[in-house]
Structures are given as structure tokens and as C-alpha cells.
Image (cartoon, rainbow, N blue to C red):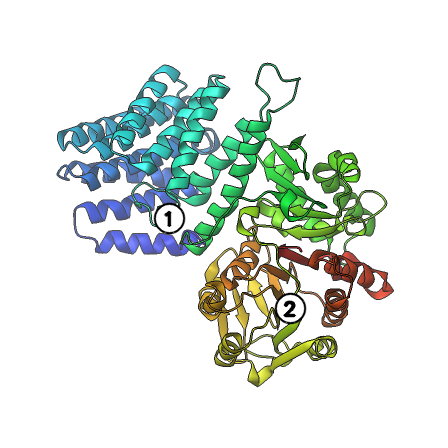
């Protein structure tokens, strides 16, 4: 419930758990959950009043690892409370009293952690000791007592390395990196962060089920490690390089970390780590493609540019993260036809200035035809085709594809005879409106290529499974309602009488994905949309793509009118069947979008820019 930010529901649940729990560790854990929630929702007074009760209950517990972790958990919430003193406590008290409260909290935290360390040593529990020492070091770090903070963190790291506790190694190494960075030691900070990063990579399969007491929450604890390391790697600091330059080794490492973050997000989304990865060289795949890696950092946007047969380059836009995200949301909203046109173009040009303009000359000199974006965060929700250079849209100069990390798509695929399985709904089902335009869409596809069609009552989970398993379709086209969400449980496709979720998709396409049958070359989802207001909704689109084993997926960022979608799909398939052998899927989509844009009814980006090609663009 907390993950969905339904704090009221979570509070009632924790209250009930605390009430029903017998005395002992279970009650303490329930109360700690309450405290953590109160701190999160900034109920400072309630949080302060709950601490003595938890301390009293903790004092009655016999020494154990669970009791030690409970103390560290308490300290962690108290540190967050202490850090909120300016924001919250001073609203309730005068500044003088607020300072005294903060000092009192600091002393309480130190006492709680001292007992935790003492009990860990008494039990000879090296893991608990390392964890407790690291938390105490964090307190010193936040008080800017650098020497003590560094010494304790190094001690925690040393113990964790001795017992090979990878999760605590990652925590302690990250903290050491922060401390060294705060003291201006950038090379030392990079080395520490690389230790953390390497441990996260080796822990990939365990991260989704890691010890819940070491509260690894992805967005809070894991993702920042990747971002901080990229930030450090792209900080000009090496002697011998011209001012502002970053070494090739650092650029390559930063690119590797960005791709690893993409994989980590997908692992976290699926709650497992089953994605196959294989590093590839873009030059070997397509000498006319450039790969653009934009990443949003706390104080800036960094973009790494990979061009065929050339060293990596990068460029920076200094802008705080909150302003970047606010502007990206504005751009997304501006795609609505009712938004003022001049303002939409102005906003789209600003994003173009961040992501593309610094690379214009290099892209032209390299004769680039396709831009492959490995987008980060909310950039995934952005219709790159609609970026504007002041005169033209990006799609007018380049075909465009999205990749959730090039490591995932190493194969270059040969053209095969088009044979399409089309499944869809035209009638209203399960509370969703009808899609009358789907009939025309299906007819357009049937007129151009060989098809098997499952429409309305014929489109059930069972009939779809049978079709997938019985005929070698290189293309599967789904014209049905669906939603992409950052929550896998809210990501689905509609059939006549059911919903197909991500896990179901995995099972449906299992034989294709495992190579028992020919894999799907292209999966088209023409009527789905991303969940409104969901920054990570396009993970759902990538999720369907990866779970199907499809080499490429064509989907939509928002729901578009039936008729315009029919026209776009008609042109897209026309491009795919053209005899011109060099027409890639990305180019077929580009031509379809440009053709739709020429129609006065559909020239607005709302109609053509939402369609994105994910994966192999060839």
C-alpha cells in the first residue's frame, strides 16, 4: 500500500498490525513501520511522540539480529526526522527549541546505534555489526564530521567484504563515495562508487528478493547509486585533458552504467532478473544510426552521443532536476490539440536544444539516418518525433527508435515474408468503449499482407495462445484496449472476456521467447496507452516487448483516434512490404508519420507523434 502512496490505507494497516501483534519484536516492527510512515508524510509531532514507546519496547527485547536491525531501522527514521528539522520542526517550535530538539534527536540516534553495535559484537554477528556501524557513520556524515564518518564507513565496508555481504558492501561503498565526494576527492569517490556498482551488478538476481531488513527500495536506495556514479564519471577532473573534457574511459564507463540502470529498472519492474544481456557495438549493427543516451541528474542533464566508428562525446545542460521534470511534463501535456500551438513549439524546441542541437553538426557529418534513444526517467514518455528545431520536427530529418538498453537487442534480423496474426476488439467490453476503427485497420492490413484474424468473440486468451503456438507469425498485431503502467499489475491488454497481464504474456509467448518456435520479429499494439500521470509507465511497454521476446515493438504513448491510427498503420505496413530492401522498420514508421502529417486533419503531433518503435529498428 505504501508503494502506491496510499498512506491512509497503510496507516490503518500498520495501526491494526501494532494492535494485534503480541509484545516483542513483531510489535516493535509494526510500530517502526508506523514511525517510518509518519516521517514520510511529515507528521513530525506524531513521529516524535511515538519514539519513546518504541525505545521502551526495544529495551525489553533480548539481543538478536532482528532486534539489532530494529534499532538501526529506528535510527534511520530518526535521522530522516532530524534532517527535516528546517522543514517541519521549526514550523511547530521556535528556532531555539527546534535546535535543542535536533540535538536531542542526534544524541538519541547515537545511543540507539551504540547499543546495536554492542549487541552485534556480543552476538559475534559481523553482518549486523557492519550494518550498524554504517548507520552510525551516516549520522557523523550528516553532521559533517568527515574523519569519523570515513573511518566508521571504511570499517563497516571492511567487515562486509570479509563476510561477502554484497548488499551491505553496496550501502557502505556508496556512503564512502558520498563522503569522499563531499571532501573533494573525485577519483576516490569514483572508486568507491564503482565498488558499490560492481556489487549491485553481481547481486542482480538477488536484489528483487534482498533482505528486507536492509531496506533496499529501488528508487530510494539503488537507482541513486547509478546516477551518482554517472555524475562523477562525467565530472571533468583529470589532468592532461582540455578544460571541460571527460576521458573516453569515463565516457564508456558512464554509458555502461546508464545501460545497467535501464536493466536494473526492468529487473525491479518484473521482480526478477531474467533478461539476457550481451554488449554490442552499434557500428556492427547499423553504420547510419547514432545512439543518444540522455540521463537526468540532480543538477543537470547529461547526454552521451555514440556515432559509428568515432569516439564517444557528451554535452551538458545545467538545470535542476525538478525544473527538468516540470518542463518534460509540460511538453507531454502540450501534445494535446487544445494546447496553444506556439507554446507547444517553444517547449519542444527547448527539449531539442537539450538533446539534439549540440550534436547537429556531428550527426550531419556522419550521414546519420536513424536516432536510437536510450531514454531515462520521464524522457521515456516524451514523443521524440515531435521535438522541434525551430523549422522542422525531428521526424522530418531522422527515423527514430527507442531502446531500453542496447545490450538487450544484439541480433540483426533478416527480412522475412510478412505473415501477420491480427487480434482485436471493435465492440465495447469490460467497461471499455468500442473501437469501431479497428475493423478498418484490420481490413487495411489484410489487403496488404497474409493474415490470420481473431476479432471480437474470436479473440480470447485460449484462441490467441493456440494461434501463437501453431503458426510461425513474424508479426503479431494487437488492436485492442490496453494500458502500460509502472505497476505490472496495472499493465494489461484486453481480450473479449479477459485481461492479459505481463506475466500472462510471458507464458503465452514462452515457446517463441525460448527459441522453441521462431521468435516474433515485430509486435504491434495500436490502441494501448500509457497510464496518465505515471512517470515510469513506459516500463510497461518495454515489459510487453521483452516478455513477448519480440525483437521490435510498436506502441503508443497515448490513445489516438481510431481513424488516424488506421491511416498510420496502413502506411506503416505499406513501408514494410516495399521492395526497397533498405527500408527499416524505423524508416517505415517515419514515412507513415510523415504521410499522416501531410493530411490537414492529422497534421498535429497528437495524431502521429505518440507511436514509438522499441527495440531493433532494422
Question: Which sits in the foreground, 592 or 449?
Answer: 449
Q: Which residue is mark 2?
A: 527
Query: Is 210 displayed left or right of 329 in the figure?
Result: left
Residue 424 higher or lower than 13, as above or below: below
Looking at the rendered structure, the number of numbered marks drawn on it comes to 2
Residue 339 higher or lower than 149, as above or below: below
Q: Residue at x 33, y 17 (%)?
A: 148
Single out the mark in the foreground, 1 or 2. Answer: 1
Q: Can you give x and y, in whole percent of width and height, for residue 189 in the image? A: 46, 23
Q: Which residue is mark 1?
A: 205
Residue farthest along the bottom direction in this orientation: 457
Of mark 1 and mark 2, the one earlier in the sequence is 1
Q: Can you give x and y, in whole percent of width and height, for residue 517 in the image? A: 50, 69
State the image quarter where residue 555 is shown: bottom right
Residue 543 higher or lower than 447, as above or below: above
Q: Cβ–Cβ below 8 Å for labels 1 and 2? A: no
Q: Residue at x 66, y 17 (%)?
A: 242
Q: Can you give x and y, in whole percent of width and height, for residue 503 in the image? A: 44, 65
SS of the residue under disc 2: loop
- Asked whether the viewer can see residue 94, the reply is no
Question: Which sits in the foreground, 16 or 564?
Answer: 564
Q: Can you give x and y, in whole percent of width and height, for residue 508 in the image? A: 47, 70
State the image quarter where residue 479 is shown: bottom right
Image quarter (top left, top right, bottom left or bottom right) of the N terminus: bottom left
Give the numbered dot on residue 7: none
Q: CA distance from mark 1 to mark 2?
A: 34 Å
- Asked whether the viewer can see residue 586, the reply is yes
Task: Tell me the crowding category of disc 1: few under 14, some 14 to 19, or many 20 or more residues within 10 angstroms, Cα based.
Answer: some
SS of the residue under disc 1: helix
Amino acid at each position: 500500500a505504501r508503494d502506491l502512496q496510499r498512506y491512509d490505507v497503510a496507516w490503518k494497516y500498520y495501526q491494526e498490525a501494532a494492535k494485534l501483534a503480541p509484545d516483542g519484536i513483531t510489535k516493535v516492527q509494526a510500530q517502526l513501520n508506523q514511525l517510518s510512515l509518519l516521517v514520510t508524510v511529515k507528521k513530525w509531532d506524531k513521529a516524535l511522540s511515538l519514539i519513546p514507546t518504541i525505545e521502551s519496547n526495544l529495551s525489553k527485547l533480548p539481543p538478536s539480529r532482528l532486534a539489532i536491525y530494529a534499532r538501526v531501522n529506528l535510527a534511520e527514521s530518526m535521522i530522516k526526522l532530524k534532517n527535516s528539522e528546517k522543514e517541519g520542526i521549526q514550523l511547530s517550535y521556535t528556532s531555539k527549541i527546534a535546535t535543542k530538539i535536533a540535538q536531542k534527536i542526534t544524541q538519541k540516534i547515537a545511543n540507539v546505534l551504540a547499543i546495536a553495535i554492542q549487541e552485534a559484537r556480543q552476538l559475534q554477528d559481523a553482518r549486523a555489526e557492519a550494518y550498524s556501524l554504517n548507520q552510525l557513520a551516516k549520522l557523523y556524515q550528516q553532521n559533517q564530521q568527515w574523519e569519523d564518518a570515513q573511518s566508521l564507513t571504511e570499517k563497516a565496508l571492511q567487515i562486509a567484504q570479509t563476510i561477502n555481504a554484497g548488499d551491505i558492501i553496496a550501502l557502505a561503498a556508496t556512503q564512502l563515495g558520498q563522503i569522499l565526494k563531499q571532501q573533494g576527492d573525485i577519483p576516490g569517490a569514483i572508486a568507491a562508487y564503482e565498488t558499490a556498482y560492481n556489487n549491485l551488478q553481481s547481486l542482480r538476481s538477488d536484489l528483487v528478493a534482498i533482505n528486507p531488513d536492509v531496506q533496499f527500495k529501488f528508487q530510494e536506495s539503488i537507482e541513486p547509486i547509478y546516477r551518482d556514479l554517472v555524475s562523477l564519471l562525467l565530472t571533468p577532473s583529470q589532468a592532461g585533458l582540455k578544460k571541460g573534457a571527460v576521458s573516453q574511459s569515463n565516457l564508456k564507463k558512464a554509458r555502461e552504467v546508464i545501460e545497467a540502470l535501464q536493466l536494473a529498472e526492468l529487473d525491479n519492474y518484473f521482480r526478477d532478473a531474467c533478461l539476457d544481456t550481451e554488449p554490442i557495438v552499434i557500428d556492427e549493427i547499423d553504420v547510419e544510426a547514432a545512439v543518444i543516451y540522455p540521463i537526468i541528474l540532480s543538477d543537470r542533464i547529461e547526454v552521451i552521443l555514440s556515432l559509428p566508428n568515432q569516439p564517444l562525446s557528451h554535452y551538458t545542460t545545467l538545470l535542476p532536476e525538478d525544473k527538468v521534470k516540470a518542463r518534460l511534463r509540460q511538453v507531454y501535456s502540450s501534445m494535446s490539440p487544445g494546447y496553444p500551438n506556439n507554446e507547444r513549439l517553444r517547449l519542444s524546441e527547448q527539449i531539442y536544444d537539450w538533446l539534439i542541437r549540440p550534436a547537429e553538426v556531428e550527426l550531419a557529418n556522419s550521414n546519420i539516418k536513424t536516432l536510437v534513444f536510450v531514454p531515462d526517467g520521464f524522457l521515456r514518455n516524451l514523443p521524440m518525433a515531435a521535438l522541434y528545431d525551430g523549422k522542422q520536427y525531428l521526424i522530418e530529418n531522422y527515423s527514430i527508435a527507442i531502446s531500453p538498453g542496447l545490450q538487450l537487442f544484439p541480433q540483426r534480423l533478416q527480412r522475412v515474408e510478412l505473415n501477420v496474426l491480427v487480434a482485436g476488439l471493435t465492440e465495447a467490453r469490460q467497461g471499455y468503449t468500442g473501437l469501431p476503427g479497428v475493423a478498418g485497420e484490420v481490413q487495411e492490413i489484410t489487403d496488404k499482407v497474409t493474415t490470420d484474424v481473431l476479432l471480437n468473440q474470436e479473440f480470447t486468451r485460449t484462441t490467441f495462445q493456440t494461434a501463437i503456438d501453431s503458426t510461425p507469425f513474424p508479426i503479431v498485431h494487437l488492436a485492442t484496449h490496453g494500458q502500460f503502467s509502472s505497476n505490472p499489475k496495472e499493465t494489461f491488454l484486453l481480450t473479449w472476456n479477459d485481461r492479459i497481464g505481463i506475466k500472462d504474456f510471458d507464458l503465452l509467448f514462452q515457446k517463441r521467447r525460448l527459441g522453441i518456435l521462431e521468435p516474433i520479429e515485430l509486435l504491434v499494439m495500436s490502441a494501448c496507452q500509457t497510464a496518465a500521470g505515471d512517470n515510469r509507465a513506459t516500463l510497461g511497454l518495454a515489459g510487453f516487448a521483452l516478455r513477448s521476446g519480440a525483437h521490435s515493438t510498436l506502441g503508443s504513448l497515448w490513445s489516438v483516434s481510431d481513424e488516424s491510427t488506421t491511416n498510420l498503420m496502413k502506411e506503416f505496413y505499406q513501408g514494410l512490404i516495399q521492395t526497397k530492401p533498405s527500408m527499416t522498420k524505423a524508416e517505415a514508421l517515419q514515412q507513415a508519420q510523415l504521410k499522416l502529417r501531410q493530411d490537414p486533419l492529422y497534421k498535429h503531433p497528437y495524431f502521429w507523434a505518440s507511436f514509438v518503435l522499441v527495440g531493433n529498428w532494422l
